């Protein structure tokens, strides 16, 4: 069964460093998303992406964040200058049209 | 602003019991509602999706209902098993503009005792 994959599974970085989180969505899906979950808190929407552009973003998704679909398969989330409060589990999701969203296993980011 | 709440926050039941998890949302203008399972430190597994026009969906031992007008959904798990132990999340897709974002509840942590 097709699934969303994410790499790396864990990432430890120093405050101020750039990180790139990678996702491979399900191949025939057209909508892509990033969510995050700070430990012990709700899953929060960050951004959605369709037709090679951002279709919606939350107030969390400030200028330090960017997304890209550099080729036909990968979907990336970049954090330019990480802060301690960026430590969280980051989930990528994809959907075919605007229905069920399928989530990846997540990348656990720890900023020291 | 849409708020999603789940009760109880945690639930422990003996194996074999039937149980109900509750989800409520403040704005009834939703497009659909999705139930997920999350195992510790892992991703989200989609269990059921109910469209706003539907009243319930079933998959195996799971049955989800939706009462949009009252802002409620329930997830019924029949004959619970230890393997059902996980956190269960509900999420709504709001019907505002062209948004696809999901708004999540805080989850119910379920423990099924063998």
Image: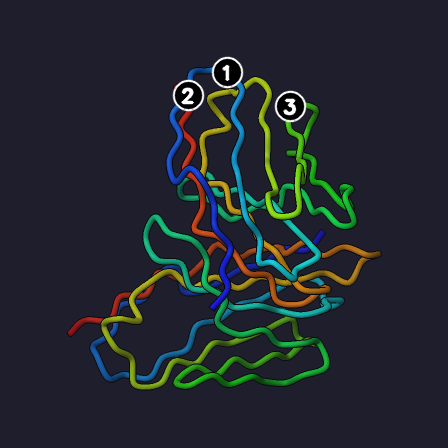
Numbered mark located on residue A17 in the image = 1
Left or right: A105 with respect to B32? Answer: left
Q: Is residue A90 above or below residue A3?
A: above
Q: Chain of mark 3?
A: A
Give the crowd class for mark 3: few <14, some 14-19, many >=20 residues within 10 Å: few
First reached walking from the N terminus: tag 3 or tag 2: 2
Q: Is residue B91 above or below residue B60?
A: above
Q: Chain of mark 1?
A: A
Left or right: A4 with respect to A14? Answer: right
Q: Chain of mark 2?
A: A
| Element marked by disc 3 | loop
First reached walking from the N terminus: tag 3 or tag 1: 1
Residue B10 at what x, y percent from top left? 34, 61
Left or right: B113 with respect to A64? Answer: left
Residue at (47%, 76%) from the top-left corner? B75
Q: Which residue is mark 2?
A: A13
Q: CA distance from mark 3 to mark 1?
A: 11 Å
Numbered mark located on residue B27 in the image = none
**CB atoms of marks 3 and 2 within 8 Å:** no
| Element marked by disc 2 | strand
**CB atoms of marks 1 and 2 within 8 Å:** yes
Residue A10 at what x, y percent from top left? 37, 35
């Amino acid at each position: 069964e097709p699934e969303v994959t994410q790499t790396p599974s864990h990432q430890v970085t120093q405050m101020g460093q750039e990180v790139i989180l990678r996702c491979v969505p399900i191949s025939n899906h057209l909508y892509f998303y990033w969510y995050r979950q700070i430990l012990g808190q709700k899953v929060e929407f960050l951004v959605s992406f369709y037709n090679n552009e951002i279709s919606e973003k939350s107030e969390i998704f400030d200028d330090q964040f960017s997304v890209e679909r550099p080729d036909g398969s990968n979907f990336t989330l970049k954090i330019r200058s990480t802060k301690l409060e960026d430590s969280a589990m980051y989930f990528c999701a994809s959907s075919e049209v605007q229905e069920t969203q399928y989530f990846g296993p997540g990348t656990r980011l720890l900023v020291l | 602003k849409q708020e999603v709440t789940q009760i109880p926050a945690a639930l422990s039941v003996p194996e074999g019991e039937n149980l109900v998890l509750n989800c409520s949302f403040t704005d009834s203008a939703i497009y659909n509602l999705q139930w997920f399972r999350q195992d510790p430190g892992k991703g989200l597994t989609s269990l059921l999706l109910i469209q706003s026009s539907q009243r319930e969906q079933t998959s195996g031992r799971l049955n989800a209902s939706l009462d949009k007008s009252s802002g409620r959904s329930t997830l019924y798990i029949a004959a619970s098993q230890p393997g059902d132990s996980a956190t269960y999340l509900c999420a709504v897709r709001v019907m505002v503009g062209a948004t696809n974002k999901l708004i999540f509840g805080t989850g119910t942590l379920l423990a099924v005792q063998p």
